Image (tube, rainbow, N blue to C red):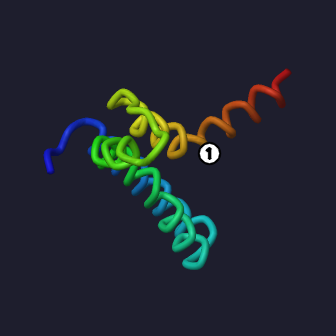
Amino acid sequence: MTMNWNRILSGLIAVIYIVAGFMKCGAEFGCVVTLLVILPLTFIWFGDGMDNYLAGMPSQGSSPNWVVPFGGWVWLLLPVIIWIVNALIILL
């Protein structure tokens, strides 16, 4: 497993989410946040392996190597995206 910028940055973002969840809302919410960031991190960290696994399934075509990690990034950053959109709506 090589450490590249995707793994380092996504791990840092996940740790920020988890620490914020524990500090802001307590242990129960922090545990929920921890469970919720596992799947997007898996898509980002092991996206090539998942892509190869899914491409071998019947009636599934192969996708470029960036599709699965990109989906993980969107999922991981979805709370930030929602916050930004909400802030823009309030400002308008």
Can you say whether 36 is above or below 3 in the image? below
Residue 49 placed where, x, y %? Answer: 28, 47
Q: Nearer the viewer, residue 61 or 74?
A: 61
| Label 1: few (<14), some (14–19) or many (≥20) C-alpha neighbours in 10 Å | few
Q: Nearer the viewer, residue 2 or 34?
A: 2
Residue at figure coordinates x 54%, y 70% from the top left: 30
Count of numbered labels shown in the rendering: 1
Q: Quadrant of residue 61?
A: top left
Q: 27 or 58, which lies in front?
A: 58
Seen in the picture, residue 23 relative to 2 is either above or below; the reply is below
Apparent side of residue 25 relative to residue 60 in the rendered image (left or right): right
Specify the amino acid type for callout 1.
Pro
Label 1 sits on residue: 79
Q: Residue furthest top?
A: 92
Name the image quarter holding the C terminus. Answer: top right
Dividing the picture into quadrants, the one containing residue 29 is bottom right
Kind of element beneath mark 1: helix
From what the image shows, is residue 85 above or below residue 55?
above
Give the vertical position of 76 relative to 37 (above or below). Answer: above
The residue at the far left in this view is 2
Q: Residue furthest bottom?
A: 28
Q: Residue at x 54, y 64 (%)?
A: 33
Left or right: where 45 falls relative to 14: left
Q: Is residue 9 left or right of residue 86?
A: left
Q: Is residue 66 visible?
A: yes
Residue 57 appears at what percent x and percent y?
41, 48
Q: Residue 86: x and y, percent?
A: 76, 35
At x 53%, y 61%, the residue is 36
| Residue 12 seen in the current view | no
